[in-house]
């Protein structure tokens, strides 16, 4: 049975000086230390028959001469190393110099796996669940930035998660509605998804053109799973207590079949965030058959059913009162048991079928059909005409009763003292104030007339049916030119609705819109979430557990694309070019007629109730409808990439890439309020991006240096933000258009071997400036009205003006005015892309022994991380009063910068190889050894305003933050054979 | 050495597994949540013991302590009463009334959806120590209502809402459900005068029924008919006390076109946009210096062509409305309804407006600047006489 196949440096082939007969030459080296391997057996095969054999010399080299033109197979073997098999073409009678063939130690220890923490997804903690960069073998920068920086939520080059293209078996998996990389679909299947190939930045891949933030293709095929049995137990203190995992892969059997199974369970809570827990399982199974040399058919299926409790952000006031920056307001005690109100429950199986046709070593054609289905629910407390149940609701906090500045109109210190007492005394009598009071919710429901639930647990569903097709062809025309191309198609039909998960002791929940009820008391029809039911039955529906209510619509997305890329390689010079063109269409299909946006009836007539017309029209005279099919938004997309690379002897490489992209907005960005109606955001445009990078790399004898500079401009982005607006007393939507960004910076990765064998020093630096560069426009609408309540520029989105000021004689700050009486701007303060350090660095000391121990200690320093901005605070209307007091603008529009952070981490591991068959080992990592608990990793500003005492200006609400947890460990023990 | 290492490792694994299984099956993860612990219900004896009071004080005695200025209760005083109002239909907001045999009083809790926790018919005990008595709606000699709330350091009002959760739970205790309060049917002599408070007239602050009310009231002092009164604000986010921000819609129901019990935001918007109020003046009655509503139709509006909004300077808002009624003895009774009440946009029976029919109305009897007001719990409290 063939072991791990490793093909190295095929693309760095250099043609040796011509001779009268052909040949193959190379040096065999140890991948870890790059030291020569003497005594390795090298066997040469032609058409399946062994024609020659050698043993490498002291310098690890070998040479086969007098070979005819044609394809050969080399098998390199050494008892201590995994076998290496290479396919080599001899042409035109020349000797091919492979330079080096690297071999990996047969029983290397398992290092902390870069993908280990990938499944520690934090979607529900306000983050995307993607790792920073998926992978980057042999690239010290990517290895560290991809894994080591994930705890501070580092975003590579400041890009959003959706810019990272993630493929599975050749199919692009980014979420059809949001663009996010859906890592949670396979979290817990680390072994099955281990094999992957990736590109960095703008580099094109041969399975797709990709974007400007790298691409990754996870093989996901049974034949690519590491053969053998493997069992592992992992425990960590940051998210879940226990992970059990088992994996079996057959490798390619003699009969051409390959099988693989991977299963895991992630269970338990953690030491830092109460209420956060996992009860997640994962299963992968696949079978693959090789038919002769040309055909290969693979089938695989996987799913990660389970549930996990989520974390919530709170204000610093709450954290300080609780004395804990990891406080989580989502849970409360019920009969002494911790119960989390926000639980994500998922079961999203993915089934794939891949066929590959390889008629020759130069041509490969693959077709993949992939189907994602199942459901994805997320619970939350819904309540009707009752007190807000959240313990950290702002009216429960001391700051609601008293602020030092009397202009906040919060002037009751006695009430504040009561609230402080309630929050700061951590005794059982007060637990129900500091956490969710489940008992109260049940009591309210028990005591309500006919047991109508006033509080219920809703489950918001986003259930996708996503069918993908990908056709890919790779053709190596000759040594100089290779071409790739393909076609892709996607049909996505997603059900969006919510249902009752738990009536919390009540008998039913009434399907009406309470926000509408307040403003539309005049007509019962207006408040109906399901007007058709109301017309048929004369009353709103009483929803039982499992019943859908509130909203119910289909998101429909269709995508069709074609792409092509070419690579031209001459000696050490390589040129690549790639382009893609596509068509995307999306629309909404409402399945529940909401009273507020009744639209037209099935016959196209206006709808009336009790003499009142329910049908409403927008400013352009179009019917606003919640039911039926919306207008279809259509977009043509395209991208073009080009790159050049030159490598010269001695391990030097220089590469440059450019790319332009025209991408469609996502479904989430296209509708102003998909929950309630069919209305598209006005003025939807493609997002345009231009990007370039330049890289210098040096790799030799264990030295590894990469320096990259990049520059990216992004134009015409759209975003829709939904929030509760106090001034409207309703749920509202901010549709922002014309958001531009600029990302520029450098990446540096260095690895240097030190004086002791196995000891090395590595360091990385990511230094960038990621900023907003435009003044977006915002249109605000209310969920319960067709009226546009705000239509203005977000004047201070891009920057905050800082005005010239001086201290007057009485010690007060005064602002300078020009001759016209206007305040004078001293300078502008830029606004930055939030929630990632714009300077991230690490220095690490690694030590590996030949007896399979490894140790690492590293220090990380991060700075220039910023809080996510709320557009409301950057509008002119929120800056009321600034005409006479420019301090208001400085206060209201400034962006919060987080404190720098220093983290110390260490890891170690060891593996034992028993009887040349069994391998047992462990790896352990301790992160944040200094127990730094003040590192903000993200957060957001609340979209709420406090009106001043004289109503002449506004103040901001406190922002909410997420913090990194303190010292935590991860221990992984494995056994494999 | 190796054996020791593996033994240690195994022990560690075992410990971790046990811990995770403990978490798995014990507190955090079970999906079977037992019934919640029911509310604690206080008995009178328990409430007395907890408050330290020797006996339950009557509401009248409590109110009698009020002497023209806000008053903090510093002694152990316990009152008890049955909840007589509900905020469910939205006509009461953030507070409820309790009543005993001697009178009724508003408890200014300061939270929404109170009927969920303090339904009508529930006995409530109030430990008054630390709370504050104060009057709302009094003007000179004309009285308003004495309320029980908390201190307001700004002095803007005599009391503020109790509001802070621990403060509320430390002072307001739930007793047993004792059934809905039966309204007292008032005769002409039972109605309060302009200086009566809960201390001098036991009906004030209690649930009452007044029969035979006819729409409209003729003010003999100013010699004018009164039917409708509503106060609106041009800007909800500006100072509501400034005259230039105030708009009084006060006249007959025919002239104001206000024929509903109150105005929701939608109703107010429709009447405004219809132009019915164009000739009403902005400002207090003695200060009509800010033009008329009609002046705002396009004022300051950037683009007349689109006409997305009319009256851009007038915020859309829900508005409370007082409708004037007269008893058979021609005593004025205002039925005041909140614009947030669910029945606010319900049309008043035209026969009532046309004075062809009288009504019997049940509600909490309150005083505002010496005037009698009735606040309905719901529209079921109005009975139209044949």
Image (cartoon, coloured by chain):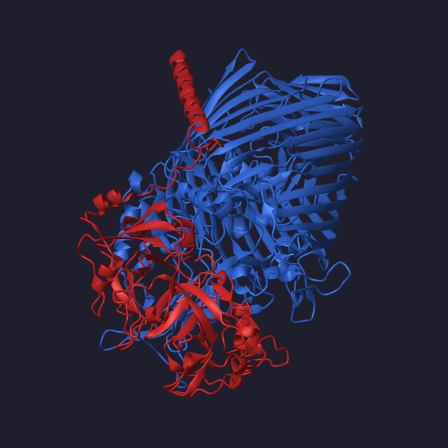
Chain colours: A blue, B red
Q: Nearer the viewer, residue B214 or B123?
A: B214
Q: Position of residue A905 (x, y in %)?
A: 39, 36
A358 versus B265 height, above or below = above
Q: Residue at x 64, y 26 (%)?
A: A225
Which is nearer the eye, A421 or A881?
A: A421
Q: Is residue B165 above or below residue A122?
A: below
As drawn, A201 above or below A6: below
Left or right: A95 in relation to A778: right
| Residue A405 appears anywhere in the view | yes
In the image: residue A129, left or right of residue A955: right
Residue B242 at what x, y percent from top left?
A: 37, 79
The image position of residue A47, as x and y in percent, is 80, 22
* Drawn side of residue A691 relative to residue A621, left or right: left
Identify the image quadrant of residue A897: bottom left
Q: Which corner quadrant holds the N terminus of chain A?
A: top right
Q: Position of residue B199 (x, y in %)?
A: 25, 65
Q: Quadrant of the C terminus of chain A?
A: top right
Q: Is residue A723 left or right of residue A316?
A: right
């Amino acid at each position: 049975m063939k072991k791990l196949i490793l093909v190295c440096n095929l693309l760095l082939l250099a043609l040796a000086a011509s001779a009268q007969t052909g040949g193959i030459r190379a040096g065999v080296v140890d991948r870890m230390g790059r030291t020569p391997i003497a005594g390795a057996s090298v066997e040469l095969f032609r058409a399946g028959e062994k024609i020659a054999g050698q043993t490498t010399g002291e310098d690890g080299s070998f040479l086969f001469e007098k070979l005819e033109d044609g394809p050969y197979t080399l098998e390199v073997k050494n008892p201590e190393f995994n076998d290496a098999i290479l396919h080599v073409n001899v042409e035109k009678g020349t000797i091919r110099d492979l330079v080096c063939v690297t071999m990996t130690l047969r029983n290397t220890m398992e290092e902390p796996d870069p993908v280990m923490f990938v499944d520690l997804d934090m979607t529900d903690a306000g983050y995307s669940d993607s790792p920073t960069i998926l992978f980057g073998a042999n690239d010290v920068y990517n290895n560290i930035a991809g894994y080591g920086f994930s705890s501070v939520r580092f975003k590579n080059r400041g890009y959003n998660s959706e810019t990272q293209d993630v493929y599975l078996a050749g199919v692009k998996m980014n979420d059809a509605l949001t663009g996010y990389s859906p890592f949670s679909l396979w979290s817990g299947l680390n072994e099955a998804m281990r094999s992957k190939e990736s590109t960095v930045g703008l580099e094109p891949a041969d399975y797709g053109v990709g974007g400007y933030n790298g691409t990754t293709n996870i093989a996901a095929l049974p034949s690519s799973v590491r053969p053998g049995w493997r069992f592992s137990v992992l425990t960590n203190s940051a998210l879940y207590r226990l992970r059990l995992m088992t994996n079996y892969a057959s490798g390619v059997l003699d009969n051409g079949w390959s099988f693989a199974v991977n299963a895991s369970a992630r269970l338990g809570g953690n030491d830092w965030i109460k209420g956060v827990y996992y009860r997640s399982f994962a299963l992968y199974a696949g079978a693959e058959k090789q038919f002769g040399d040309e055909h290969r058919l693979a089938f695989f299926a996987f799913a990660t059913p389970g549930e996990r409790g989520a974390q919530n952000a709170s204000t610093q006031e709450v954290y300080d009162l609780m004395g804990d920056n990891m406080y989580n307001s989502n849970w409360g005690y019920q009969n002494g048991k911790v119960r989390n109100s926000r639980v994500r429950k998922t079961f999203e199986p993915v089934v794939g079928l891949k066929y590959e046709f390889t008629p020759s070593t130069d041509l490969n054609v693959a077709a993949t059909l992939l189907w994602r289905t199942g459901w994805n629910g997320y619970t939350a407390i819904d309540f009707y005409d009752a007190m807000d149940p959240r313990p950290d609701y702002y009216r429960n906090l001391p700051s609601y009763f008293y602020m030092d500045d009397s202009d906040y109109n919060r002037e009751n210190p006695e009430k504040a003292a009561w609230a402080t007492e309630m929050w700061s005394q951590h005794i059982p009598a007060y637990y129900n104030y500091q956490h969710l009071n489940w008992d109260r919710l049940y009591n309210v429901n028990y005591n309500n007339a006919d047991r109508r639930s006033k509080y219920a647990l809703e489950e918001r569903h986003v259930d996708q049916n996503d069918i993908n097709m990908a056709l890919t062809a790779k053709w190596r025309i000759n040594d100089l030119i290779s071409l790739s191309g393909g076609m892709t198609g996607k049909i996505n039909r997603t059900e969006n609705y919510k249902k009752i998960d738990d009536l919390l002791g009540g008998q039913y929940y009434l399907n009406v819109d309470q926000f509408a009820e307040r403003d539309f008391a005049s007509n019962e029809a207006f408040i109906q979430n399901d007007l058709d039911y109301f017309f048929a039955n004369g009353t709103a529906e009483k929803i039982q557990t499992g019943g859908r209510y509130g909203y119910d619509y289909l998101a429909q997305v269709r995508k069709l694309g074609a792409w092509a890329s070419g690579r031209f390689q001459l000696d050490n010079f390589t040129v690549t070019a790639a382009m893609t063109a596509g068509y995307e269409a999306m629309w909404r299909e409402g399945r529940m007629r909401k009273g507020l946006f009744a639209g037209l009836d099935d016959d196209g007539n206006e709808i009336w109730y009790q003499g009142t017309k329910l049908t409403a029209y927008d400013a352009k005279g179009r019917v606003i409808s919640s039911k039926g099919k919306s207008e279809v938004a259509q977009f043509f997309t395209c991208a073009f990439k080009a790159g050049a690379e030159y490598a010269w002897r001695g391990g030097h490489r220089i590469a440059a890439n450019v790319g332009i992209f025209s991408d469609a907005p996502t479904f989430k960005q296209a509708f102003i309020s998909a929950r309630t109606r069919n209305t598209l955001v006005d003025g939807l445009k493609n997002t345009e991006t231009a990007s370039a990078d330049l890289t210098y790399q040096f790799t030799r004898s264990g030295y590894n240096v990469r320096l990259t500079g990049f520059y990216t401009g992004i134009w015409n982005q759209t975003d829709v933000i939904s929030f509760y607006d106090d001034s409207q007393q309703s749920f509202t939507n901010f549709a922002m258009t014309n958001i531009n960004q600029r990302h520029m910076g450098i990446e540096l990765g260095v690895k240097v071997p030190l004086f002791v064998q196995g000891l090395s020093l590595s360091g990385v630096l990511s230094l960038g400036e990621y900023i907003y560069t435009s003044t977006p426009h915002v249109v605000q609408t209310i969920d319960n009205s067709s009226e546009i309540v705000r239509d203005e520029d977000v004047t201070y989105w891009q920057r905050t003006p800082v005005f010239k000021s001086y201290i007057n004689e009485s010690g007060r700050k005064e602002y300078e005015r020009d001759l016209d009486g206007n305040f004078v701007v001293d300078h502008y303060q830029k606004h930055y892309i939030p929630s990632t350090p714009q300077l991230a660095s690490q220095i690490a000391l690694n030590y590996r022994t030949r007896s399979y121990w490894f140790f690492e200690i590293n220090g990380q320093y991060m700075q220039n991380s910023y809080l996510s901005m709320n557009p409301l605070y950057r509008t002119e209307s929120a800056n009321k009063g600034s005409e006479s007091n420019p301090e208001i603008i400085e206060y209201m529009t400034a962006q919060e910068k987080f404190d720098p952070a220093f983290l110390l981490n260490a890891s170690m591991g060891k593996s034992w190889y028993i009887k040349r068959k069994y391998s047992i080992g462990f790896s352990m990592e301790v992160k944040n050894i200094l127990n730094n608990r003040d590192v903000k990793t993200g957060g957001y500003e609340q979209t709420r305003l406090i009106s001043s005492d004289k109503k002449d200006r506004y103040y901001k609400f406190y922002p909410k933050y997420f913090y990194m947890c303190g010292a935590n460990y991860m221990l992984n023990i494995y056994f494999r054979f | 050495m190796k054996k020791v290492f593996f033994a240690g490792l195994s022990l560690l694994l075992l410990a971790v597994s046990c811990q995770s299984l403990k978490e798995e099956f014990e507190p955090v993860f079970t999906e079977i949540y037992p019934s919640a612990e029911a509310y604690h219900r206080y008995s009178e004896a328990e409430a007395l013991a907890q408050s330290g009071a020797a006996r339950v004080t009557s509401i009248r005695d409590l109110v009698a302590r009020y002497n023209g200025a806000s008053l903090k209760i510093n002694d152990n005083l316990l009152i008890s009463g049955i909840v007589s109002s509900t905020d469910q239909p939205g006509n009461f907001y953030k507070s409820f009334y309790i009543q005993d045999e001697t009178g009724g009083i508003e408890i200014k809790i300061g939270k929404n959806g109170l009927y969920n926790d303090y339904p009508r018919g529930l006995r409530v005990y109030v430990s008054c120590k630390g709370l504050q008595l104060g009057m709302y709606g009094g003007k000179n000699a004309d009285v308003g209502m004495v309320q029980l709330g908390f201190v307001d350091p700004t002095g803007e009002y005599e009391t503020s809402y109790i509001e802070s959760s621990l403060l509320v739970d430390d002072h307001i205790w739930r007793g047993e459900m004792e059934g809905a309060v039966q309204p007292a049917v008032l005769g002409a002599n039972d109605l309060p005068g302009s200086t009566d408070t809960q201390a001098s007239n036991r009906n004030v602050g209690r649930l009452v029924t007044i029969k035979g009310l006819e729409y409209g009231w003729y003010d003999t002092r100013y010699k004018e008919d009164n039917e409708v009164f509503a106060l609106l604000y041009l800007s909800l986010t500006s100072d509501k006390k400034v005259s230039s921000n105030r708009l009084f819609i006060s006249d007959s129901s025919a002239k104001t076109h206000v024929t509903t019990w109150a105005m929701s935001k939608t109703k107010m918007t429709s009447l405004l946009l219809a132009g019915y109020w164009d000739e009403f003046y902005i400002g207090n009655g003695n200060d009509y210096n800010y033009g008329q509503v009609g002046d705002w139709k396009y004022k300051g509006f950037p683009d007349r062509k689109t006409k997305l909004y009319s009256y851009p300077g007038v915020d859309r808002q829900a508005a409370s409305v007082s409708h004037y009624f007269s008893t058979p003895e021609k005593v004025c009774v205002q039925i005041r309804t909140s614009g947030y009440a669910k029945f606010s946009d319900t049309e008043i029976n035209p026969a009532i407006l046309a004075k062809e029919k009288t009504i019997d109305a049940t509600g909490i009897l309150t005083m505002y600047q010496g005037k009698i007001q009735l606040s309905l719990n719901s529209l079921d409290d109005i009975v139209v006489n044949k």
